Amino acid sequence: MSQLNIRSVKASEIELKDKVVAVNRVTKVVKGGRRFSFSAIVVVGDGKGVVGYGLGKANEVTDAISKAIDDAKKNLIKIPILKGTVPHPMLGKYSGGLVLVKPAAAGTGVIAGGAMRAVFESAGIKDVLAKSKGSSNPHNVVKATFDALSKMRDPFTISKDRGISLTKVFNG
């Protein structure tokens, strides 16, 4: 992920809700037969702009999910939300996953596929248009969505970085 906007957040300070994006059964073939284990990808967020994702692997589904939740709490980032939507359009890329995220008018809702929808809802984004243009693998889609969200910058940050007034940011 790019280092533009990532602000780490302590998990102990906030109330987080988790969403399971995908659970995958993995098989290892050994001499005695097949050995099954599970991998899970989970998104956690507080609904106010703090969101994170995590991966967990274990022999039981519940253990994999709880490991993923613990991992997600270690990787929290704060994203800018402007009037319930994202500040500007952005492309996110991770491996084969490519996502397009665009701001939407109030009342539009979350127009996004399953893996992206979990990220937006956990982050507290109410209105957004999103399209997955690359891989449909949930791992790559979630990571690409995080890439796009982590590159977002709100007008206040831009005005502070450039040393200009907010009106100049909006008027060009």
Image (spheres, rainbow, N blue to C red):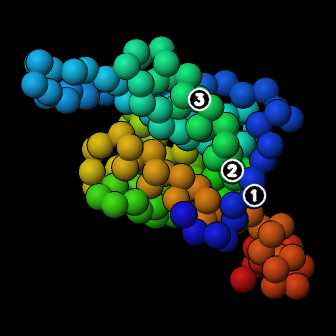
Q: Earlier in the sequence, mark 3 or mark 1?
A: 1
Horizontal and vertical percent for residue 28?
Answer: 19, 29
Q: Quadrant of the N terminus?
A: bottom right
For this rendering, which residue is in front, 101 or 77?
77
The amino acid type of the residue labelled 2 equals: Ile
Residue on which disc 1 sits: 7
The amino acid beneath tag 1 is Arg
Residues 37 and 149: in front is: 37
Name the residue beneath numbered marker 3.
69
Report the mark closest to the observer, 2 or 3.
Answer: 3
Horizontal and vertical percent position of residue 160: 86, 76
How far is disc 3 from disc 1 in space, using C-alphas?
A: 19 Å
Q: Residue at x 11, y 18 (%)?
A: 32
Q: Residue 156 at x, y = what percent?
A: 83, 67
Residue 85 appearing in the image: no
Q: Do callouts 1 and 2 mark residues in contact (Cβ within 8 Å)?
A: yes
The three-letter code of the residue at mark 3 reads: Ile
Which residue: 40% across, 15% down? 60
Helix, strand or loop for disc 2: strand
Residue 55: horizontal and vertical position, in percent? 48, 37
Label 3: how many Cα within 10 Å (few below 14, some 14–19, many 20+) = many
Q: Residue tagged by mark 2?
A: 77
Q: CA distance from mark 2 to mark 3?
A: 15 Å
112 to the left or right of 38: right
Q: Is residue 110 left or right of residue 6?
A: left
Q: Which residue is located at x 87 percent, y 84 percent?
A: 164
Q: Quadrant of residue 50?
A: top right
